[in-house]
Amino acid sequence: MLPLIKRIDSHVHFYTAEDLCRVEGSLPYTFPEPHPLTAYLQKLTATGVSQAVLNNVHLSILPDSENVFASFLELNKLQTENPERYGDIKLVGTIMATPDYATEERLAHPQVVGARIVLHDAKPETIGATRFSDAQWEMFYSRLHAHQHLHIYAKEAETNLRVLQQIPENVRVVIDHLGSCHAERGPTEPAYLALLAEAKKRGNVWFKGPGYRTSSSPEVTARFVEQIIYSVGPEKLLLEATDAPHVGTDNNGVPYSELFDLAKAFSFVDAVAQHVSTQTQIPVDQLLRGASGQLVG
């Protein structure tokens, strides 16, 4: 039997049917299927893949991140029952970043590496001057540990920029989905270049994949990755992620679940990395997971 290929999934969502019951009937798109950790690991093993590191990221449709903490217990149970199969897997989590939820106690959990702000398609003008910098948010920032980061997801580059400008400069930041979900505007969109310039100035901002929410074309996504590299540096990039189970739709209304499964998601980031490597001569492995040690351990 051939050894399993070790992968990192720096952005995945694990949740159960019980988690979904809490939001039943409130979603603007097709209700997703449960996506528990155990089934995910079994599916990957069947395709010849083994996970080294997983980051269970707060799922925006859920009202809290209790599913993240539950996944820690689920993996612990698996490792106790079958240490040979599951013992080498490291699971970390990124919880919901609201001042009332991301408490000192929750952030003190040894597997929590960050907290996530979810803004989806929020327009830049909706980000008021103090929306993320009032007294409650300042207290939240002070609770973040040195190894933890603030994770931002917004489709608009300018929205990401306006949020970033309100965050204290000592806070480590990860910008989700390469900073833009509008491939039609191109990687030289003024707001996108301004976001990259702010990231470079701060020196502690990373950009994370998988990138198919930027564009489902690896060639198009690669242009945004190249712009990040030229503007901020390859050490600020982490491509290897699946964003499973591929909830939501692209800008044309096509469900991501019709475009991707786990294998296709990994193939997508591999293709992006290969395109970028050809243009920049940076090794594929560095593009995929070079920043993983700084962000997910």
Image (spheres, grey):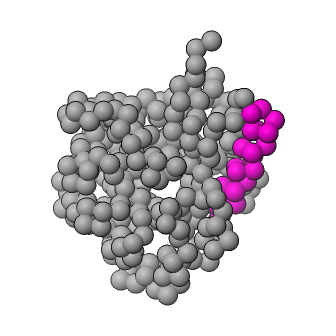
**Residue 3: x percent and y percent?**
58, 19
* Horizontal and vertical percent position of residue 205: 35, 60
Q: Quadrant of the N terminus?
A: top right
From the viewer's side, name the closer residue of 257 and 72. Answer: 72
Query: Along the horizontal axis of the image, is 134 left or right of 200?
Result: right
Q: Main secondary structure of the magenta part?
A: helix
Nearer to the camera, 74 or 194: 74
User: Which residue is at a point 42% across and 64% down the rendered structure image?
Assistant: 172
Residue at the (34%, 43%) spot, across then down = 215
- Residue 292 is one of the magenta-drawn residues: no
Q: Residue furthest bottom?
A: 135
Residue 296 position within the rendered picture, expressed as x and y whole percent measured from the top left? 51, 50
- Range covered by the magenta-colored residues: 64-83
Vertical comparison of 258 with 136: above or below? above
Would residue 81 be counted in the magenta stretch?
Answer: yes
* Image coords of residue 55 (percent x, y): 56, 49
Q: Is residue 97 left or right of residue 270?
A: right
Above-or-below relation of 98 to 271: below
